[in-house]
Each structure stands twice: as structure tokens, then as C-alpha cells.
Amino acid sequence: MDIPSRPCRVLTVAGSDSGGGAGIQADLKTMLALGVHGMSVLTAVTAQNSLGVQGVWELPDEAVRTQYRSVVDDIGVQAVKTGMLSSATLVATVAELLAETDAPAVVDPVGVSKHGDSLLAESALDAVRHRLMPVATVATPNLDEVAQLTGVQVRDEAGMTRAAEAVLALGPAWALIKGGHLPGDAVDLLTDGTETHWYRAPRLDNRHTHGTGCTLASALASHLALGHPVPEAVGLAKEYLTGAIEAGFALGAGIGPVDHGWRIGGGANAGEKGSVSTGK
């Protein structure tokens, strides 16, 4: 009997979303859907549902460091994705760990939740700028996070170019500026300062979009682990996210999550009335 080869391994360093739509939960679902082995380093526990974030409890620095070394030193990784890092201490710790790891790093500089709840202390912004961004292979800020980190306010596609320049000045190899908050098509801009790529998708009429940032960053990390170059990995990640948004479903009384299982038969209606969400 042939022994199957090991799958590509991707590590997420992020907070837990008790509602299952974002954070560690979204990351691991995305990785499973894309055929890689997902592993996790928990940075914080949140009490969170479709209405917002009711509480955040940060893990100690040593717990984060030990989780990371436990996984990387034994199992190894082909890519790392970071999400919620709520304090300057955690940001510095994770930046140090990434610098020691020979794998691409996707940094999602999470600042606020989908509901507007702050997930990053003001005192941590300098650490994100000067410690975390310089070790990122790809940084994936949305427009609110661009404003937090650089002061650049984006109101149109021309502004996205200025935003990318400002983010690149902080040190990542590539900047992926997510323009989902602009009107019109969902437009993202990727650049390394030399080559530039625009990605467009139709804006979908679905308010259930919780977890979009985590999902895109995790999909990008998964495709980098699978060996795709950055521009191709971004295109594949956006394609996956667009399908997940289209299939997003209601949970609770507020904003529901995207459907991470839209390609593999999971999601909104699996087990209900014999039907499955397909994203079509």
C-alpha cells in the first residue's frame, strides 16, 4: 500500500471567533477547502457572534511563542498567515518568529471587526508598522487598515495606488490593497513597486460577509504554500473568496459568514432539507 505524501502545511497565527465565521475558524476551514493542512497558533479568545464582539482575552506572549515553535520546529510550514494580534507585545513576538521562519508570510493587519469593534490596541500600531510589515511577503490591508497604518484616505481607485505606495514604504515585499469598501466592482490592487496587478469581481448582493479578510489571506497563504507565484496566488484566492461571498448565509440576528465550504458541499444548507449550498 502506497503511503500518501504529506500535504502542504499552512500555519495561521490569529484570534478565535466563537461564532465560527472569521479568525482561526475561518482560516482552518479555508485551508481544508483548498487542500492544505491547516495548523494554528491562538493569540486571543473572543466572545463573538453575528452582532459583534462582546469580549476579548489575549493569550500570554509565552503561550503564543510556544505554540508557534511547537508546530514549526516539528511539523514545518510552507506558509504562515497572521491575523488578530491585539497588542504591541504580541506583534513584536510574532514578527520575530516570522523573521526566523523560511516560508512566505501573509500579514493581514486586522484593526477592526466587520461590526466596527476594535481588535488592535492603538499602542500596537507602531509595532505593526515597524516590526511586522517588514517581514511580510504580502500585506493585505483593507482601506480602513490602510488609513490606520499610513494615514492615506482612499476614496477611488487612484487612491488605491497611493495607498499601495504608502504600505510598501513600510517594508512588505508585496502590498495587496483591498478595495471592497469602494462603490462599484470589488477591486483589489497588488504591487511590489515594480509590477502591478488589478483584480476585479462583480459586487454581490449579499450582506453576509463576515470573515472576508481572514478568508482571503488564508486562501492566499494556501496557494503560496502550493507553489503559486504571488500574483497567481492572489487571483486564485480572490476567485475562492468571491464564491464564498456569493454563498454567504444568515446566522443569528446580524451579519452572517461567507461560506467556506461552497466548493466542497459544506455550508449554509448542508443537512437542512437535503440541500447543499453550492455558491451558484
Image: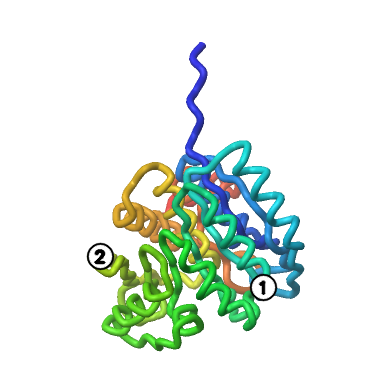
Residue 226 in percent (x, y) is at: 40, 42
Name the disc covering residue 197, or none.
Answer: 2
Horizontal arrangement in the rendering, residue 236 relative to residue 209 (left or right): left
Please give the residue where the numbered disc 1 appears in the rendered image. 87
Mark 1 element type = loop
Horizontal arrangement in the rendering, residue 42 relative to residue 127 (left or right): right
Tell me what residue is drawn at x 45 percent, y 58 percent: 244
Occupied quadrant, residue 243: bottom left
Q: Residue furthest top?
A: 1
Tell me what residue is drawn at x 50 percent, y 62 percent: 248
- Report whether residue 143 is seen: yes
Q: Amino acid at mark 1?
A: Ser
Mark pair 2, 1: CA separation: 32 Å
What scheme was used to colour the molecule?
Answer: rainbow
In-front residue for pair 192/223? 192
Name the disc covering residue 259, or none.
Answer: none
Q: Amino acid at mark 2?
A: His
Q: Of the residues under marks 2 and 1, which one precedes in the sequence?
A: 1
In-front residue for pair 262/119? 119
